[in-house]
């Protein structure tokens, strides 16, 4: 896993330690200003995560966050900060952050929140939902579907790419090799795809993705589905469903 992070900041370092406990081969590239972040992006084509701190140089009023997000199309960007202001938390999400982490974030919360973000979802601390002055308007302007996990959320660009490979019958290991990702990261993306499409298994995800227009015409074929379900039975259990739930194809 490749991470671009402002690791000179204590909050980022705590979060990175949790990442290293959760995943193998975490490689961190330090960038302690927004200019360094932007300069480092071209050198990390297979980046998995960017971790920024709200107080790092160039971040002013999340302008730096917006600049970073523009250059990181399908890479989740998270923000660490000492501020528990609901207005600031919602503003960070509105400006492109996939997660917002506080000094009070416990190791247990981090262990759940980081995989959530890496699978394409959002994480915000509970204090973001405190209705203080000005926060009601911000929450009204920002649809909750952009902040909270919902089965109806659209797939991210990375999830769309993986959905196509699922339709081609590729296993998690093959997808990871093709995209130069960790197999665990691919599993998280697949789980996110299942949740967003509201299905229980990979075959259901392929069919739902095709109906939703996420797959190129001609991608979905019975041969690919058979191949997918004959190569790796372990992967059928990602949502707790068995291969016997493979839906029949309509004519």
Image: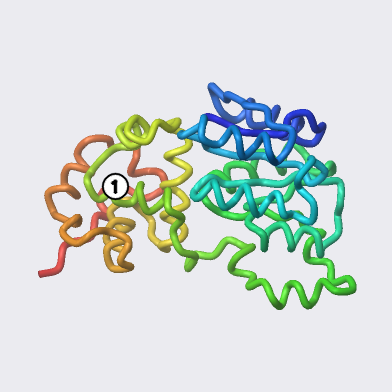
Residue nearest the observer in this picture, 170 or 5: 5
Residue nearest the observer in this picture, 94 or 71: 71
Q: Does residue 75 lie above or below 95 as drawn?
A: above
**Residue 160 pos. (x, y %):** 37, 54
As drawn, which residue projects farthest toward the right?
133
Name the residue: 58% across, 42% down: 115
Q: Quadrant of residue 172?
A: top left
Q: Which residue is mark 1?
A: 166
Name the residue: 56% across, 28% down: 23
**Residue 230 pos. (x, y %):** 19, 39
Q: Does residue 97 lie above or below 21 as drawn?
A: below
Q: Is residue 18 left or right of residue 153?
A: right
Residue nearest the observer in this picture, 213 or 250: 213
**Residue 38 pos. (x, y %):** 61, 39
Name the residue: 29% across, 56% down: 206
The mark total stands at: 1
**Residue 84 pos. (x, y %):** 86, 54
Q: Is residue 28 left or right of residue 186?
A: right
Name the residue: 82% across, 62% down: 86
As drawn, which residue projects farthest toward the left?
251
Q: Does residue 30 lie above or below 237 as drawn?
A: above
As drawn, which residue projects farthest toward the top?
25
Q: Quadrant of residue 121?
A: bottom right
Say which element carries label 1.
helix
Neighbour class for label 1 at 10 Å: few (<14), some, many (≥20)?
Answer: many
Q: Quadrant of the C terminus?
A: bottom left
């Amino acid at each position: 896993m490749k991470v671009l992070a402002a690791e000179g900041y204590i909050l980022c370092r705590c979060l990175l330690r949790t990442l290293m406990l959760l995943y193998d081969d975490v490689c961190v590239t330090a960038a302690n200003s927004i200019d360094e972040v932007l300069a480092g992006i071209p050198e990390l084509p297979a980046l998995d995560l960017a971790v920024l701190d709200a107080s790092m140089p160039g971040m002013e009023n999340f302008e730096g966050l917006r600049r970073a997000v523009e250059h990181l199309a399908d890479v989740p960007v998270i923000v660490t900060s000492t501020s528990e202001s609901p207005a600031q938390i919602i503003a960070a999400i509105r400006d492109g952050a996939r997660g917002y982490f506080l000094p009070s974030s416990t190791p247990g919360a981090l262990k759940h929140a980081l995989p959530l973000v890496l699978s394409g979802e959002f994480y915000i601390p509970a204090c973001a939902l405190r209705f203080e002055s000005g926060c009601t308007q911000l929450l009204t302007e920002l649809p909750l579907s952009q902040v909270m996990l919902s089965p109806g959320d659209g797939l991210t660009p990375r999830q769309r790419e993986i959905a196509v490979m699922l339709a081609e019958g590729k296993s998690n290991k093959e997808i990871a090799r093709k995209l130069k990702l960790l197999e665990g990261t691919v599993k998280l993306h697949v789980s996110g795809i299942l949740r967003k499409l509201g299905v229980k298994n990979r075959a259901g995800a392929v069919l739902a993705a095709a109906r939703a227009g996420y797959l190129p015409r001609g991608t979905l074929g019975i041969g690919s589905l058979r191949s997918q379900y004959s190569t790796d039975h372990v992967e059928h259990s990602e949502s707790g469903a068995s291969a016997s739930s493979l839906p029949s194809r309509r004519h």
